[in-house]
Image (cartoon, rainbow, N blue to C red):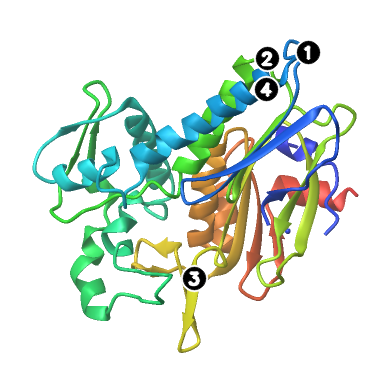
Amino acid sequence: MSLLATRLLAIVGLLCCIVPVAAAQWLHEEREYMGTKITVEYRLPKSTNTPVEADALFESVFREFQRLDLMMNPWNPRSELARVNREAATRSVHTTPEIIDVVARALHYSQLSDGAFDISFASVGQHYNYREGQAPSQDVLARDRDKIDYTAIQLDRDRREIRFLKAGLQIDLGGIAKGYAVDRAIAILSNAGVSAAVVSAGGDSRILGDMGDRARTVGIRHPRREGEYAVLMPLADTAISTSGDYERFFIKDGVRYHHILDPGTGESALKVQSASVLAERAIDSDALSTTVFVLGVERGLALINALPGIDAIIIDGSGRLHYSEELLLSVDSK
């Protein structure tokens, strides 16, 4: 059984959210960055004795989220990612080490999944407006669908340069950047002496340590029943990410249009309602939850079962739960 599966001590019933605790030594703060609510909780280390020190640590964490948000927001014309999108089809663009690292990891998962994970989905994704309930026409899809092509993203890690080999190709790091930011936040807390913490950014969370006498209870949201969980589980030293068709969506003519696009079609992936992945790092659980959502139950679980130390829980289109092999063994043993 994998290390992550052994941490899953029991499954009793799924939001990827952290069930809050009431403990005097735990501090909690929330802010909005990266288009979602960021929640930071940590247990005061013995070396931190004053409210001023505690506030300074929160500020350090939230400054990092703000910095990465300003860098990687494709909708902000002044962001570094927006500049890359404007210029990379005409020349090699020298960019930040953070963007290079995230794009490199994204391309790893593109290759691993044969394109089911593809940050160039934005070539078509830019034409959706979920607030206004607008989807691109079939003509627009036919025109831009072939621009979704991760193999046309050329990366030079040594020179910190990126280039697009197709005109009109655009990238969006929304399926991996929040996980990367969560990992950075955990590193800041850990380097400050924190041994127990939870950082969440929307559907991406990472747990450092535990509650002291028990694991931290994590719930995965029921995709069709507001305020309910489909699964509750105790976790420690684990990242968990959930991709769901309920996060940004609209329904038109009986069709649910949501933000997780199938790179092969440019349209919303419709095989499952929710995919949750457990991994050591949030950058990996973030990318893989999107990947599994696109692949669907059979292909998604086949991928996860082939990856050491990775586990998944999927809710299919009819609401049925599916577990990766290591988790299924854990469930059957209870």
Residue 312: horizontal and vertical position, in percent? 65, 50
Q: Is residue 301 above or below residue 237?
A: below
Q: Looking at the picture, tell me which residue is in the foreground, 191 or 319.
A: 191
Q: CA distance from mark 1 to mark 2?
A: 8 Å
Q: Check the image and name the residue furthest to the left.
A: 90
For label 4, the SS is helix
Circle on res. 54: 4
Residue type for callout 1: Lys
Dot placed on the residue nearer the N-terminal end, 3 or 1 = 1
User: Could you tell me how many numbered marks the image carries?
Assistant: 4
Report the residue marked by disc 3: 249
Asked if marks 1 and 2 touch (Cβ < 8 Å), the reply is yes
User: Residue drawn at (33%, 26%), measured in percent from left and top?
Assistant: 97
Q: Tag 2, which secondary structure? A: loop
Instruction: Please give the residue where the numbered disc 2 appears in the rendered image.
Output: 193
User: For the residues marked 4 and 3, what is the alpha-carbon distance in whole angstroms?
Assistant: 38 Å
Mark 1 Cα within 10 Å, few/some/many (few <14, many 20+)?
A: few
Q: Which mark is residue 46?
A: 1
Label 2: few (<14), some (14–19) or many (≥20) C-alpha neighbours in 10 Å: some
Q: Mark 4 belongs to which amino acid? A: Ala
